[in-house]
Image (spheres, helix red, strand yellow):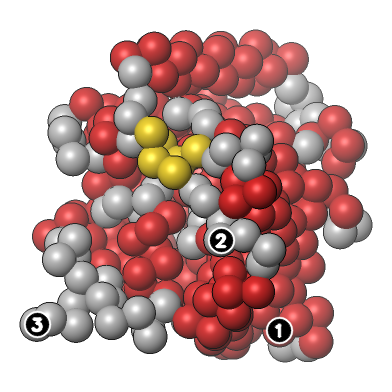
């Protein structure tokens, strides 16, 4: 099929999606938590500004550090991983590079703003929400997917055509030092989590807090591995899915979401029929069922940013363990958007 991208791999998408669905199901079964990347990143990394210093922050740190470890484990066994073959970088010292930086920074800010306003992203609404049969989540998914397709297929090409210079985002091969730096980053993140958990306030909702945090870490390992295996850390692949007018469509994201729901949908229904999770006294689920302007506008704003650069909160965080100018810029802009719209 000439209209399908030659980079498309159904097996990678299915395997990565199965890992992601298993991650979300494991987290709900034991810790009673919804695995939403936007909340993980915003409240986990901005916790001093959010005023949260309790077990809610600890489990997010556990998940985030686990996701880094899972990403590295998956990378070691996959020579085709984009982390080994190259990392996105932007040359800030040329007009084309500056236009590329403007595009990446705008995308990050819109993603952070939109996910904060709508209170969710692809994992929280697209996997966990749909697995709970939430109508609110379905509306959010339709809003951000429609907006992302419009952004990648129409808005991004128009913006690129009207910038003073064509945005330049080059791919540079990573030296071994990049891999080593990523491993150090993972070790430091894990150590920071352990130190923070020792000083965290007790939470009466957790019957087995240490086991609960260990499960959050394990869930992060599975999710991080799933993102790498499915190549969702590769922004070009995501854009190839969202840009339906490119002539080289890549349906891999569809296989990732479908296989994740294949695991999560029956698992969530079975788990939520229980009285409580294994390690906690109750399930920590979203309580709002309201479908309002804030939900739809936030989801559309997120989709707009996602379609501009092809990166959402999960891959945006994972990119930090193989840092480049573009990944750091995107993460900083995303956190700025989260902080700007925080309640």
Residue 289: x and y, percent? Answer: 70, 82
Residue sitting at x 53%, y 24%: 210
The answer to which quarter of the image holds residue 177 is top left
- SS for dot 3: loop
The answer to which quarter of the image holds residue 83 is top left
User: Is 113 placed left or right of 318 in the picture?
Assistant: right
Residue position for label 2: 166
Residue sitting at x 60%, y 51%: 96
User: Is 25 placed left or right of 109 in the picture?
Assistant: left
Q: Earlier in the sequence, mark 2 or mark 3?
A: 3
Residue position for label 1: 296
Above-or-below relation of 104 to 70 = below
Residue sitting at x 19%, y 61%: 7
Please indicate, yes or no, whether residue 107 appears anywhere in the rendered image.
no
Query: Which label is found at residue 1?
Result: 3
Judge the density around disc 1: few (<14), some (14-19), many (≥20) Cα neighbours within 10 Å. many
Alpha carbon distance from label 1 to label 3: 35 Å
Question: Viewer-nearest of labels 2 and 1?
Answer: 2
Residue sitting at x 80%, y 30%: 53
Residue 154: x and y, percent? Answer: 54, 84
Above-or-below relation of 184 to 38 = above
Above-or-below relation of 26 to 172 = below
- SS for dot 2: loop
Between 265 and 41, the residue placed more toward the observer is 41
Residue 138: x and y, percent? Answer: 53, 84
């Amino acid at each position: 099929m000439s209209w399908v991208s030659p980079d498309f791999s159904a097996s990678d998408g299915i395997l990565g999606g199965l890992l992601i669905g298993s991650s979300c199901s494991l987290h709900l079964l034991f810790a009673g938590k919804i695995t939403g990347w936007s909340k993980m990143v915003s409240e986990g990394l901005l916790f001093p500004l959010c005023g949260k210093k309790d077990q809610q922050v600890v489990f997010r740190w556990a998940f985030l550090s686990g996701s880094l470890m899972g990403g590295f484990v998956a990378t070691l066994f996959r020579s085709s991983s984009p982390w080994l073959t190259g990392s996105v970088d932007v040359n800030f010292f040329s007009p084309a590079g500056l236009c590329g930086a403007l595009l990446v920074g705008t995308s990050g800010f819109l993603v952070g703003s939109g996910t904060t306003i709508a209170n969710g992203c692809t994992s929280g609404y697209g996997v966990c929400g749909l697995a709970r049969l939430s109508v609110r989540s379905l509306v959010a998914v339709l809003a951000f997917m429609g907006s992302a397709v419009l952004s990648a297929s129409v808005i991004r090409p128009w913006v690129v055509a009207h910038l003073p210079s064509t945005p330049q985002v080059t791919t540079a091969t990573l030296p071994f030092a990049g891999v080593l730096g990523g491993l150090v980053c993972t070790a430091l993140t894990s150590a920071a989590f352990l130190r923070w958990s020792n000083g965290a306030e007790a939470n009466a909702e957790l019957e087995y807090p240490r086991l609960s945090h260990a499960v959050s870490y394990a869930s992060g390992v599975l999710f991080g591995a799933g993102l790498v295996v499915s190549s969702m850390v590769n922004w070009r692949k995501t854009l190839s899915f969202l840009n339906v007018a490119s002539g080289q469509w890549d349906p891999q994201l569809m296989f990732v979401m479908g296989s994740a729901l294949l695991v999560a949908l029956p698992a969530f229904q079975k788990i939520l029929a229980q009285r409580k999770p294994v390690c906690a006294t109750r399930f920590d689920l979203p309580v709002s069922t309201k479908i309002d302007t804030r939900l739809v506008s936030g989801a559309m704003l997120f989709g707009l940013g996602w379609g501009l650069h092809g990166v959402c909160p999960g891959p945006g965080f994972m990119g930090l363990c193989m840092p480049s100018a573009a990944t750091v810029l995107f993460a900083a802009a995303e956190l700025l958007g989260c902080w700007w719209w925080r309640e």
